[in-house]
Image (cartoon, coloured by chain):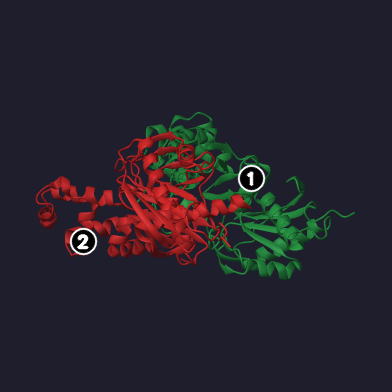
Chain colours: A red, B green
Amino acid sequence: MAPGSEDRPSIGLDIGGTKISAGLVDASGRILRRDRAATPGSSPALVERTVADLVAGLRREAPDAPVGVGAAGWMNPETGTVLFSPHLAWRNEPLRDRLVQLLGTPVAVVNDADAAGWAEYRFGAGRDESSLVCLTLGTGIGGALVTEGRVRRGRYGVAGEFGHQVIMPGGHRCECGNRGCWEQYASGNALGREGRELARAHSPVAHTLLDAAAGDIDAIDGALVTELAAAGDPACRELVAEAGSWLGLGLANLAAALDPGTFVIGGGLGAASAQLLEEAELSYRRHLTGRGYRPFARIRRAGLGADAGLIGAADLARRDAADAQR
Amino acid sequence: MAPGSEDRPSIGLDIGGTKISAGLVDASGRILRRDRAATPGSSPALVERTVADLVAGLRREAPDAPVGVGAAGWMNPETGTVLFSPHLAWRNEPLRDRLVQLLGTPVAVVNDADAAGWAEYRFGAGRDESSLVCLTLGTGIGGALVTEGRVRRGRYGVAGEFGHQVIMPGGHRCECGNRGCWEQYASGNALGREGRELARAHSPVAHTLLDAAAGDIDAIDGALVTELAAAGDPACRELVAEAGSWLGLGLANLAAALDPGTFVIGGGLGAASAQLLEEAELSYRRHLTGRGYRPFARIRRAGLGADAGLIGAADLARRDAADAQR
């Protein structure tokens, strides 16, 4: 007998700024087969065409596999329209309708951080937790809230933008238009900016950083600072400690508002720096309101790495398909 | 035929720092009968005795009415224990068990801001809204999140402490132990503190304020500043404008994280100052992340005034009783 839609594999895609990752994923979150392609510029039509090609390739093995697509940006959950996507320059793009036309089947369209959070909840570091906040630390901070078995997306589908809580009024300018957003203090971009500032100030402590960048200050980025900190460079360790302290303060704010049982920290930066998470934990415990009279949410490193987005998109698509059959 | 527990009146109580309000409330949120008593110091046993007396009085008319009690503080929703109450000096107080002993029936024990938020959702300014953040502006900021027909209390029952999001690191000291909490900038206490500072600086613009306080700087509080602002005093209007601007910034942070459809602003300060809400709305629209690409949550003034807490506690008790019968 053919397996029911709850058990059969589904296809997940994660559309990033530089590449699109795709995978055929089974019901336990295991990736059976993968594929990828470069993200073709910022043309929505070319991106959609590439998504369709990747899906067609994976469907050769699993003809009717449900399809879920995760992308950075705000989705209208009712229409599947991308209201706004920071890296892809999509504005009111009817992504779901276009993909349905190209593929001839239903497609689930979700925010990439929501997809990653869902994957961690189902199969990763949050799988024993009913109330989860998942952060994806990269150039910015993506966020997802999962409670009682559902991703919570708010009234209009745009919740979870934790990185844009203002924690320093009048502070650093953010791409979102505001000043002082959390992600300007606790992300890879923040580490890069601080590293460049340190180097530009001709600080004697920045020589390792400058040497590693071959004297090119503009080449200093968050990844380099993180790498040098992990290798023991004192100046870079200071920068990571500072970012970790900001990270912990924002976690305490989220705990005050949401009281999750667990924070899962993923993304490239989350994976790269154990020090960042240690500093964040200390700062979180120092900043939590009502400490001493409440349980502390645990802070855990994500379990699924860079695959979380496509695994979550695939799993959400499988659920949608199963719901539609009922 | 006797009405089912879903329709019959229930009793709600709101335990404040100075008084306990009680009411018999019908299934449409109307208060059929009320009573009140002074809060007897900070002795838990005396407070519980007073609650029991108030309930006994109201039960003369409605013998088996379910009882709900709202109080400031953190409740463990499973045990009904008050983990911590700021005004009542309760620490790990088994409030529900004590009241059950005194009353001989089940009692629902809830956070007062949650009770007020629930009442606004059911019968007040949020009754046409599926996704609601309700703020109670008084000396501090109480908060409640209602989505899809439920008060969301987080993993350990202590969510909704929106007033303790840090929005100004290193800022004013808060009773919670942190610095820079939102409620130190956008509450009645904040207005009082700023008014006193202005007066202490011998500012020429503070003479109206000083006159109204009969020269006693320590007598200046948030209520006085709000009242003088409403009467047109320029200095107090500036203070209210500033608090409103902070209020709007915090609302934008909550919209980024939670994306509610409506904010309902209640509490004594929320009711007293139209100017505060106007300024908050302007600031909120200026600070919202992704403005231009997303719907704005509405900001509404609460509809039930000071009765919201007891009405919500009564309604939650009625629901609990109905659930228990199923």
Q: Height in image: B218 above or below A9?
A: above
Three-letter code, disc 2:
Ala
Quadrant of the snapshot with the N terminus of chain B: bottom right
Q: Position of residue B174 (x, y in %)?
A: 43, 54
Q: Is residue A173 visible?
A: yes
Identify the residue under disc 1: B121
Subunit of mark 2?
A: A
Q: Position of residue B101 (x, y in %)?
A: 72, 71
Q: In which quadrant of the rendered view does residue B51 lie?
A: bottom right
Residues packed near mark 2 inside 10 Å, few (<14), some (14 to 19) or many (20 plus): many
Quadrant of the snapshot with the C terminus of chain B: bottom right
Residues packed near mark 1 inside 10 Å, few (<14), some (14 to 19) or many (20 plus): many
- For the residues labelled 1 and 2, the Cα–Cα distance comes to 50 Å
Helix, strand or loop at label 1? It is helix
Q: Height in image: A42 above or below A270?
A: above
Q: Height in image: B256 above or below B42?
A: above
Name the foreground residue: A13 vs B211: A13
* Residues beneath discs 1 and 2 located on the same chain: no
Identify the residue under disc 2: A229
Name the foreground residue: B104 vs B291: B291
Three-letter code, disc 1:
Tyr
Q: Is residue B217 visible?
A: no
Between marks 1 and 2 in the image, the one whose residue lies nearer the viewer = 2
